[in-house]
Amino acid sequence: MAGILAWPLLVCSCSEEADCSMVGRPMAVCNIYQLDAGGTVLRDTLDSLTVTAWGTDSIIINDQKEVRDITLPLRYAVDSTVLVFRYSRHTSDTLVVRHTNTPYFLSMDCGYQMQQQIAGIAYTRHRLDSIYIINNEAGIYGQENIQLFY
């Protein structure tokens, strides 16, 4: 009887696999803000937003309504990511996010992951007023990285 009970434990322990999906891709989290007349920072909402990766056919956000926050991927192979924020048919801003990409070994099963640090941002000011980097490390936990002021 003891041999029968030990066998399921042996099967369970040998079939364990690494869950690499738990390590998600680091993303830059941006929240939308405005300054009122007294200089107080307030959360804001954009009526409509489409975000594309410049020079590609990649659509990151497709005509999303009532936008209060966005999550943006940063490129792995180069040290900058260029994004186009389209607010309407005729109005857009371009952001150039400069970042460092540092690969680090996660495990034998999951391989390497990329750590990304935001070094700076250049942008046009058609609708955007200013941008502040709050936390320069893009992560997987949804922590705010960038404040976008309109």
Image: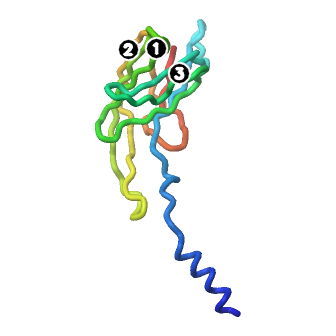
User: Residue 139 shows which numbered tag?
Assistant: none
**Image position, residue 29 (x, y; %):** 50, 33
Q: Is residue 49 above or below residue 146?
A: above
Q: Is residue 57 left or right of residue 86?
A: left
- In front: mark 2 or mark 3? 3
Q: How far across and down, in percent of the image, does residue 144 sit? A: 53, 33
- Residue at image position (57%, 79%) is 11
- How far apart in space, not on screen, are marks 2 and 3 (Cα)? 20 Å
SS for dot 1? loop
Q: CA distance from mark 3 to mark 1?
A: 18 Å
Q: Place residue 78 in its image quadrant.
A: top left
* x and y percentages locating residue 142 in the rendered image: 55, 38
Image coloring type: rainbow
Residue type, label 3:
Asp
Residue 19 coordinates in the image, percent (x, y): 51, 59
For badge 2, the amino acid type reads Thr
Which label's residue is closer to the chain start, 2 or 3? 3
> Which residue in the protein does label 1 denote?
128
Helix, strand or loop for disc 3? strand
Q: Which residue is mark 3?
A: 63
Q: For mark 2, what is the residue?
A: 124
Within-10-Å neighbours for mark 1: few <14, some 14–19, many 20+: some
- Looking at marks 3 and 1 on the same chain, the residue that comes earlier in the sequence is marked by 3
Q: Quadrant of residue 124?
A: top left
The answer to whether the residues at label 1 and label 2 have Cβ atoms under 8 Å apart is yes
| Badge 3 density bin: few <14, some 14–19, many ≥20, Cα 10 Å | some
